[in-house]
Image (spheres, coloured by chain):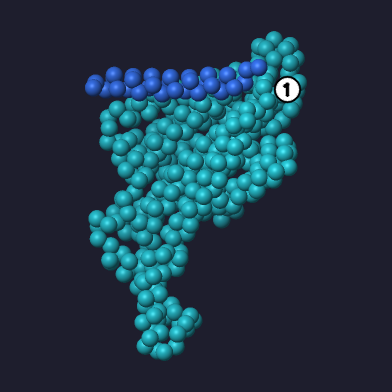
Amino acid sequence: MDTLREILTNTSHLHLLLNHIPTTAFLVALVVFVVALVNRSETLTKTSLALFFMIAAIAIATYASGSAAEAWLRGTSPTTELPANVLSDAIHEHEDAALWGTMLMALTGFFSWLALWQGRSVRKRPSWTLPLITVLSLLSFVAMSRTAYLGGHIDHVEIRPDVVARHKACLDLVDAETKHPGSVSNAPANCPWQTAVDEVVGSQAPETAYKSQARALGDFVIGHTWMWPTLETLHFVGLSLLFTAVLIVNLRLLGMMKVVPYSAVYQLLPIGMLGFAINLVTGMLFFVGIPSQYNANPVFYWKMVFVLLAGLNVTYFMLVDDTWTATAGVAAPVGPRIAAASAIFIWVAVLYCGHMLPFIGNAF
Amino acid sequence: MPLWLAVCLIVSAAVVVTGLLAYLIDRSNHV
């Protein structure tokens, strides 16, 4: 029980747990998607689109937990010495790849959701949607695989190309001296990995050190006085769009405005999703601006949990047919009613956690 | 440019873009 508690509350553990999902689970979704396209199966198409959408939501939490994992290594000061085998550049390269990978995956998630929504809208799904998702999902997979590859370099010095090159140079020297080429079993003894790491670090002039794009973006956010108030205002615009759509759709399912059929309020859902998209972009910019406000903040952790639950909740509405029985004047069945009540609770929780970041947590 | 004007202009531009996207999504759904 203590181990489970440690895993769920230590954000480093959480990152190691989550970081396999945007690559491995996404590959599974991609295979299902390709099979669906080849076989023209609507059921498999919907399954893969729902998977894309959920994995995109998890990718956001993965990105946030990664920043927390970095903070766990470095402490609060960026100058704190890292463990001997961890290179600062490796973390930054991974972080930059993750930022682009997460954004691409979020875009894939947005259009996957839109395609699911179009599957039940008035007209047939437009012909451009699935080709666009094919391109976006392939790009996302490449970007996330690269992120995973670079992430491996953080703790596995033995696969870093620059360290491997140094190590190999040392082994060649040993081979030349001992005339016993390829004595792999002696490799770590004769040429310790740490020596290769030290050489790589030692040979790095400060000006050639990797320039973090995420940090440059973060510096842009906090370096311009107009940025933060603009982002805050837009975050509120997004929140208003999102919460309005959430309330209208879910209150109808709970029994209000029964004269309005569910098929009518369903048309409002993309407005809610556009609101979420605004808040994802502005939220990510807040996060890269001052990560320390969020990655050690328990309320932010809960906000991410509720965002994931909200993703699961909206997927329910995309996949389940029960809601469609709520025609004009007809009450919704019990399943959709529970989902609707959950949706309102979950989104209020997201709003509450967001608002309480500075008051319960340590933001600002 | 004063801060209030910069924020107003950027927020308005972003709202217009969002409105346009909402319009296009809705139009793709008209019979």
The residue depicted at 49 percent of the width and 41 percent of the height is A104
Q: Report helix, strand or loop for mark 1.
A: helix
Given the image, on which type of amino acid does mark 1 rest? Answer: Trp
Q: Which residue lies furthest to the bottom in this view?
A: A179
Coordinates of residue A76 in the picture (x, y in percent): 34, 49
Q: Which chain carries label 1?
A: A
Picture quadrant where residue A157 is located: bottom left
Instruction: Indicate the chain coloured blue by its letter.
Output: B
The residue depicted at 39 percent of the width and 36 percent of the height is A285
Residue A240 seen in the current view: no
Look at the image and give the colour of chain A.
Answer: cyan
The residue depicted at 74 percent of the width and 11 percent of the height is A329
Residue A45 in the figure: left or right of residue A361: right
Coordinates of residue A35 in the picture (x, y in percent): 69, 45
Residue designated by label 1 = A324
Coordinates of residue A124 in the picture (x, y in percent): 68, 25
